[in-house]
Amino acid sequence: MTTATKVQGPASYFPSIEKKYGHPVQHWFDILLAAGDLKHMALVDLLKSAHGLGHGHANALVAFHLARRTAPG
């Protein structure tokens, strides 16, 4: 018997983000990368105001993006 690993944390929002906004999450990560070294809430505000994302979805994308950017390796 196999058990599927349930995705947790910010990545758990990715399927609904892709479905709701019609873009793969990489599209949003590219926007965040192009925005440069803004702080967390500035990036969230960018996604909300310029691209119409809801707060929870924008926050999940930014949290994942920043964690990946600061991860060792």
Image (cartoon, rainbow, N blue to C red):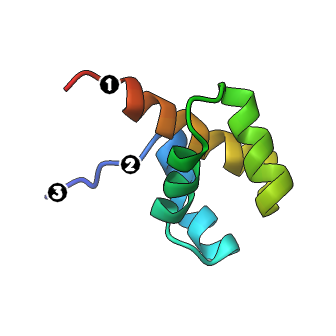
Q: Secondary structure at mark 1?
A: loop
Looking at the picture, tell me which residue is in the foreground, 31 or 16: 31
Which residue occupies 69% across, 50% down? 57
Which x, y percent locates residue 39? 66, 25
Which x, y percent locates residue 42? 75, 32
**Would you place residue 64 above or below residue 32 in this image?**
above
Residue that numbered label 3 is attached to: 2
Quarter of the figure with the N terminus? bottom left
Q: Is residue 61 left or right of residue 72?
A: right
Mark 3 neighbour class, 10 Å CA radius: few under 14, some 14 to 19, many 20 or more: few
**Would you place residue 63 above or below residue 71 in this image?**
below
Q: How many marks?
A: 3
Q: Is residue 29 left or right of residue 69?
A: right
Tag 2: residue type? Answer: Lys
Instruction: Kindly indicate the quadrant of the structure image that contains residue 22.
Output: bottom right
> Label 3, label 1: how many angstroms apart (C-alpha)?
30 Å
Residue 6's tag is: 2
Residue 71's tag is: 1
